[in-house]
Amino acid sequence: MEESTKQPGPEFVAIAIDGPAASGKSSVARSLAKKLGYLYVNSGSLYRAMTWVFLKQGIPTEPGDAVRGFLKGLDINCGARDGASTVRIDGEDPGDELQSQDVNRNVSAVSAIPEVRELLVAKLVAYRELDNIVMEGRDIGSVVLPDTPYKFYIDASQEVRDRRRRDQGQRDEIRERDQRDSSRAASPLVVAPDARVIDTTKMTVEEVVQEILSELRGKGLDLDS
Ligand code: DC
């Protein structure tokens, strides 16, 4: 991890934002983090980076001895730059490859491997020691940050989510990915029981951010310090 100017301690605030693919959670989490001056942590980029390296090295995307041995030899460096999380594997930054069609197609299979999750959840939990954070993903409120009182689940209708992903110019079978992410045995996409659910179908990013800020104030979080 890179150096932070803040002193580590239990006073760090962690905000969890979960939701299905193309729900708008990345835009919301990034904008919220910027407004608050918190670090934005995109957990999906870790699973994407892992998928990228599996594909690059021809590792089977299923549990087994080959995967366990492969994971042991990997150097995964999670840090932060310009207010956002970064990831390098064996010294390489996957860059735009994180959004490739091949990664989109295989990321749910790689994310379902328990050993992959164990390794990446530990990396994600370590961000708590670094700074105040807004972390987005699938299991953040349920598994990565279960103790935070600040949990949100961002959703939108299937049609709107299909359109949002198409508008980003990406080929991504989000229905299939959501089905696999929700039905896997290891920490599936779920709504944490204490999460505030926001249906963003008819909302702009700014409206969602304002709703989250008002909920945070309602919970007594001091947003001005
Ligand atoms: O947020 P995203 O669409 O970039 O995530 C890509 C994939 O990574 C998603 O289909 C499932 C996996 N993922 C996960 O299993 N757990 C997370 N906390 C975040 C992402």
Image (cartoon, rainbow, N blue to C red):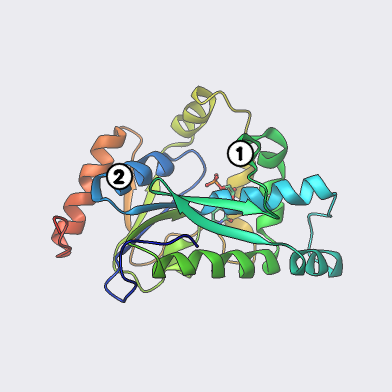
Determine the residue positioned at 77% across, 51% down. Answer: 54
Q: Is residue 177 above or below residue 128?
A: above
Q: Residues within 10 Å of mark 2 (few under 14, many from 20)?
A: some
Disc 2 marks a residue whose amino acid type is Lys
Instruction: Give me the C-alpha separation between circle 1 and circle 2.
Output: 21 Å
Counting from the top left corner in percent of width and height, residue 47 is at 62, 53
Q: Earlier in the sequence, mark 1 or mark 2?
A: 2
From the viewer's perspective, tell me whether residue 139 is left or right of residue 16. right
Question: Residue 24 occupies which quadrant of the picture?
Answer: top left
Label drawn at residue 27: none
Q: Is residue 158 above or below residue 189?
A: above
Which residue is identified by label 1?
95
Disc 1 marks a residue whose amino acid type is Gly
Counting from the top left corner in percent of width and height, residue 172 is at 62, 33
Determine the residue positioned at 52% across, 30% down. Answer: 165
From the viewer's perspective, tell me whether residue 107 is left or right of residue 80. right
Determine the residue positioned at 79% across, 45% down. Answer: 56
Q: Residues within 10 Å of mark 1 (few under 14, many from 20)?
A: few
Residue found farthest to the bottom: 10
Counting from the top left corner in percent of width and height, residue 206 is at 26, 36
- Residue 180 seen in this snapshot: no
From the viewer's perspective, tell me whether residue 79 is left or right of residue 135. right
Question: Residue 27 occupies which quadrant of the picture?
Answer: top left
From the viewer's perspective, tell me whether residue 76 is left or right of residue 63. left
Q: Secondary structure at mark 1?
A: helix
Q: Secondary structure at mark 2?
A: helix
Counting from the top left corner in percent of width and height, residue 11 is at 26, 73
Which residue is identified by label 2?
34
- Residue 200 seen in this snapshot: yes
Question: Residue 204 occupies which quadrant of the picture?
Answer: top left
